[in-house]
Amino acid sequence: MSDFDDRLKGSETRLWRLIDERLRPGADVRAIDARIWDLFGDTWAVMFTDLSGFSRQVAKFGIIHFLQVIHEQKRLLLPIVASHDGILIKIEADSFLILFRRAAGAIACAVEMQRACQQLNQRRVPEEQVLLCVGIGHGRILRIGDIDVFGAEVNAASKLGEDTAKANEILVTAAARADCGDLVGVGFEELSVEVPGSQQNFRVIYEPAT
């Protein structure tokens, strides 16, 4: 076993060994792909969150401000994620990647997260506000344990949450919209925006915090 293999565990080890097999001359790529999907493929709702204007705030107010906002975001939002049975996969800077079994649960969680941020922001000066952006997808993805996820709906949710959504917005793919059905107190507005992995997308209409 190589030093590279020694550093990997469980699901991750299995995945990269299969990828190694796939790279060999004459490999049966279709059969290997089927094995990978059989081992790691599953249907999940995927949520990406981001903070609006965060990079500008860090540049203006410095690294301590960065650490404070990251800490506050975790303290405020992760209990809400847990209450909706979300599974936190990773945190990268000001962004969360979270999985939910159903799109309805992801959207309900996102609405509560947005309201929590809005209530907090009512008593904050602008530079200390937590301005949340959320993107949600739903579909069959590759989940590598609790390490990472891959797939078209993962890419779409990332683009919606990190690049497309504005502060206080929740954007969802057509697949997420279809999976959740009708939700009490929530509506959907079609967007004229396409992202990699999802040609049709929607803005969630919800009652903001008062």
Image (cartoon, rainbow, N blue to C red):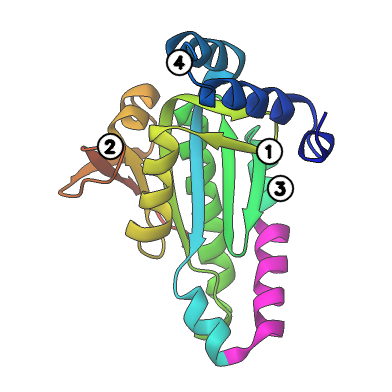
Magenta includes 73? yes
Tag 4: amino acid: Val
Report the residue that reaches farthest toward the bottom. Answer: 60
Q: Secondary structure at mark 3?
A: helix
Tell me which label, 4 or 1, sits earlier in the chain: 4
The mark found on residue 79 in the picture is 3
Determine whether label 4 and label 1 are within 8 Å by CB.
Answer: no
Mark 3 neighbour density, 10 Å: few (under 14) some (14–19) many (20 or more)? few
The nearer-to-camera label among 2 and 4 is 4
Q: Which residues are magenta?
A: 61-76
Q: Secondary structure at mark 2?
A: loop
The mark found on residue 29 in the picture is 4
Tag 2: amino acid: Ser
Query: Residue 53: image x %, image y %?
Result: 45, 75
Tag 1: amino acid: Ile
Q: How many marks?
A: 4
